[in-house]
Amino acid sequence: MDKIEVRKKPKQQRSKFMVESILEASARLLKELPYDKFTTNKVADKAGISVGSLYQYFPNKESILFELEKKEVNLMMEKVNSLLFEEKFTPLKRLYNALEYFFEAESAIYQIPIPFTSNHNEYSYQVSQMKESFHLFLKQNSYIEEGENNFKADYLVTLIIGIVEQVSFRKDIQNPMPWLEMTFNSVKNILDKKDNVTIEWD
């Protein structure tokens, strides 16, 4: 078993509550302590349980952080999806709202000190779901033809994620808003461009 996987999945309500308490305590603790001070003993104490009970589900602190990040990514993707299809706004406003939330949420996720993508495909799966949502959004709002493939959605999501990752990693960027505005304008320009340019390579 991978060292950052949970030992067992909670099935009963009591077990699910305990795992949720551990994750909530971990999130609070990460706001109070640097990573090198973050320990399973402190998490257990914060959650009000014994460290032995914690070890029933999490073999180490890395497994806690992985599960915490997975939870946050799932919530983020669900929210992005709901914002894209919130009918009370225009398509461009929905797109902006989704990008704004994604910038904020993704930056917060990158503060969790463990690489989510290392040796795991959970994040890749969620990204593929996000691309499918973008493809449906583009199709429903006539940004692409009905039978068009998902290349444009793939390109846009890859572009957005790449920019957000760079903004999240760079310590010198205190205000991400200009990056958000530029990203939104770039995406809008791509969507507004009706004519495709085909380049013939030698």
Image (cartoon, grey):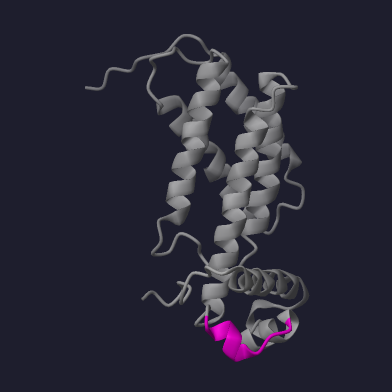
Give the residue drawn at x 45%, y 72%: 5
Residue 97 shows up from this direction: yes
Q: Quadrant of residue 41?
A: bottom right
Please state, as top left, top right, bottom left or bottom right, where the N terminus lies in the image.
bottom left
In percent of width and height, residue 77 lies at 58, 44
Give the residue drawn at x 40%, y 27%: 151
Viewer-proximal residue among 26 and 104: 26
Give the residue drawn at x 52%, y 68%: 11
- Residue at the outermost left position: 202
* Span shown in magenta: 48-56
User: How many labels were placed on the picture?
Assistant: 0
Residue 167 shows up from this direction: no
**Is 137 placed above or below 19 here?**
above
**Is 130 placed above or below 90 here?**
below
**Is 51 placed above or below 104 here?**
below
Give the residue drawn at x 55%, y 59%: 70
Viewer-proximal residue among 2 and 157: 2
Please state, as top left, top right, bottom left or bottom right, where the C terminus lies in the image.
top left
In percent of width and height, residue 104 lies at 70, 48
In percent of width and height, residue 153 lies at 47, 29
Answer left or right for 121 relative to 92: left
- Residue at the outermost top position: 195
In percent of width and height, residue 73 lies at 58, 53
52 is within the stretch colored magenta: yes
Answer left or right for 68 relative to 33: left
64 is within the stretch colored magenta: no
